[in-house]
Image: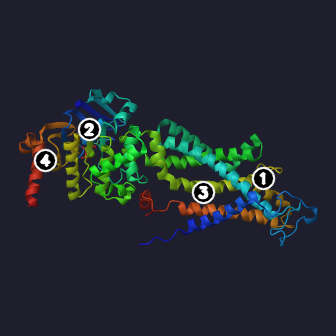
């Protein structure tokens, strides 16, 4: 029996690859200087010279979207890296060793996840002050619990598997078992949560910058910041909001399709056997 | 070499169940000892105790397990880890799931050497290929690069034996190593174990509920019943002249089954 192609994964990867290449291009080249203002060309609607029009300062929106998506992705990438690394460490240790530390950390985890994370982020940023760096740190820390929970569950499952017991029997140290043996086996689940994490991070950056507590007006453009700037001209110059909004949508759609395609599906990996049973 | 004295194991769960109630076992270097008994008689628990795999918080262990003059029950986790895989190899029943599904066979066989000895990658590879040849894995160069799911059950069990044997342990503990395999493969694995014992001098503690299997490999046998050893001695002697009621039934079951087969 042939397996149907994983359309979600293919489409998601294509979409993400395309957007990421445009973003990378934006680091080196944009049609115009993203911050260059021009009084003569204020709020020009999309035309040949400015494919997505200009904003009320006469800045080219395509250039700003390219740069802004880059900033947003950078924030998302760093925040997810912090969250995934710390979350994997914490979840791995607690899931693998269990015991009282596990109980305590997981209860703290539950308490933190009980609040909507954007709300927590708002409070945290209100304390630390806005700006890109603070936003990255705050989001990164807030992502730790969700990664920790996913990873903990997987480690707790894997630690009782025969191959782990067998590795112990051969005298393999716990750390080596955790990172050399178990981690690759939970990669599908971890990667799929990373993709979801990217989505949440892009959305969180957008909402927080839109609310004015994220990326500041003097920093390089970000998609959320652009939405905030565009709000006042929503009816007179809708292309501003539409461009930023569309860019966010495409970014998120790509990651969502990837995580969907990677998710809890049977793949060629033998670890998926167990899941196939659970699906049935 | 291995001297178990008055070993008692009870589990701390609600039932306060005693799994092993005071057994004595003795093995010299190069011995092959079979441990037979019905399901639930405490064979696996005994093996786990010797291998240091019993979770200390879940079970109470009393008595002595002397291995080369060292009491394994008094060893710390780290001391135990130095022995596990190096001097004491353990192989359990499940060859299908005991290999890391995402690690290549060769790497997996080398793992024991990697964690215990300081050899270069090249030397490790050579040792792995050699032991793979010894246990009869086909085309070691090719199999080295395969993943567990690309091997048959018998081949996986051979790979398990290879990974346990690559460090040339003094004692191999085998808990029903052939139960999951079909009869012909079972016979081949038993031959392999015999060969390893005769050629390389490794001692075997062979656990099975099947007296016939034990008889093919082991010179000595101990019969366990409800956590106690009711009879032990030379395999042929026990087989031909069983003393205890339970052993008699065990032998009878085997011989009548054989007669029925003919
Ligand atoms: N982790 C555990 N917690 C509580 N009781 C246990 C545990 N492991 C084993 N036991 C009990 O110890 C007794 C001996 O079990 P053991 O696994 O040693 O039997 P066995 O002789 O290996 O049987 P089999 O031939 O089925 O493998 C059983 O009564 C079992 O219920
Ligand atoms: Mg058993």
Q: Position of residue B160 (x, y in %)?
A: 32, 49
Looking at the rendered structure, the secondary structure element under dot 1 is loop
- Mark 3 lies on residue: A195
Q: Residue at x 38, y 58 (%)?
A: B149
Vertical comparison of B122 with A233: above or below: above
All told, the count of numbered labels is: 4
Q: Do callouts 4 and 3 mark residues in contact (Cβ within 8 Å)?
A: no
Q: To which chain does the residue with label 1 belong?
A: A
Q: Mark 2 to mark 4: distance in Å?
A: 27 Å
* Residue B171: image tag: 2
Looking at the rendered structure, the secondary structure element under dot 2 is strand
Q: Is residue A205 left or right of residue B42?
A: right
- Mark 1 lies on residue: A211
Q: Position of residue B139 (x, y in %)?
A: 32, 57
Q: Nearer the viewer, mark 3 or mark 1?
A: 3
Considering only order in the chain, which callout, 1 or 3, is on the residue closer to the N terminus?
Answer: 3
| Residue A116 visible somewhere in the drawing | no
């Amino acid at each position: 029996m042939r397996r149907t192609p994983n359309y979600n994964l293919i489409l998601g990867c294509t979409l993400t690859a395309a957007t990421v290449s445009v973003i990378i291009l934006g680091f080196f080249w944009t049609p115009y200087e993203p911050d260059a203002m021009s009084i003569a060309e204020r709020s020009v609607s999309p035309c040949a010279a400015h494919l997505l029009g200009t904003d009320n300062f006469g800045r080219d929106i395509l250039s700003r979207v390219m740069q802004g998506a880059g900033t947003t992705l950078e924030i998302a990438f760093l925040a997810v890296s912090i969250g995934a690394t710390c979350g994997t460490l914490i979840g791995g240790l607690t899931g693998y060793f269990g015991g009282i530390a596990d109980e305590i950390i997981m209860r703290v985890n539950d308490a933190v996840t009980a609040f909507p994370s954007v709300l927590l982020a708002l409070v945290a940023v209100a304390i630390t002050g806005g700006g890109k760096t603070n936003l990255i740190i705050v989001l990164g820390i807030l992502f730790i619990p969700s990664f920790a929970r996913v990873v903990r569950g997987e480690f707790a499952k894997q630690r009782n598997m025969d191959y782990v017991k067998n590795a112990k029997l051969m005298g393999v140290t716990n750390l080596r078992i955790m990172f050399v043996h178990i981690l690759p086996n939970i990669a599908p689940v971890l990667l799929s949560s990373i993709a979801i994490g990217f989505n949440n991070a892009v959305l969180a950056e957008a909402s927080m910058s839109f609310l004015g507590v994220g990326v500041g007006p003097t920093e390089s453009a970000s998609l959320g910041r652009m939405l905030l700037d565009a709000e006042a001209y929503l009816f007179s110059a809708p292309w501003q909001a539409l461009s930023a909004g569309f860019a966010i949508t495409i970014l998120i759609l790509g990651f969502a399709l990837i995580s969907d395609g990677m998710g809890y599906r049977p793949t060629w990996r033998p670890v998926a056997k167990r899941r196939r049973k659970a699906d049935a | 070499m291995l001297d178990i004295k008055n070993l008692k194991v009870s589990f701390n769960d609600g039932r306060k169940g005693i799994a092993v109630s005071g057994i004595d076992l003795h093995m010299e270097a190069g011995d092959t000892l079979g441990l037979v008994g019905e399901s639930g008689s405490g064979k696996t628990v005994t093996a786990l105790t010797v291998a240091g795999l019993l979770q200390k918080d879940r079970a109470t262990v009393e008595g002595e397990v002397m291995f080369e003059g060292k009491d394994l029950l008094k060893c710390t986790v780290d001391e135990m880890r130095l022995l596990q895989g190096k001097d004491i190899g353990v192989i359990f029943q499940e060859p299908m799931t005991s290999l890391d599904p995402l690690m290549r066979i060769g790497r997996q066989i080398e793992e024991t050497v990697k964690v215990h000895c300081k050899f270069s990658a090249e030397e490790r590879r050579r040792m792995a290929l050699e032991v793979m040849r010894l246990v009869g894995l086909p085309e070691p160069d090719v199999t080295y690069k395969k993943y567990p799911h690309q091997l048959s059950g018998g081949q996986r069990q051979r790979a398990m034996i290879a990974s346990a044997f690559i460090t040339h342990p003094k004692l191999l503990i085998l808990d029903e190593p052939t139960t999951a395999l079909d009869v012909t493969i079972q016979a081949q694995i038993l031959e392999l174990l015999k060969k390893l014992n005769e050629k390389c001098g490794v001692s075997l503690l062979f656990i099975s509920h099947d007296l016939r299997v034990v008889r093919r490999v082991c010179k000595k046998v101990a019969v366990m019943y409800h956590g106690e050893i009711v009879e032990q001695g030379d395999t042929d002697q026990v087989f031909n002249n069983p003393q205890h009621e339970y052993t008699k039934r065990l032998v009878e079951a085997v011989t009548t089954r054989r007669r029925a087969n003919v």
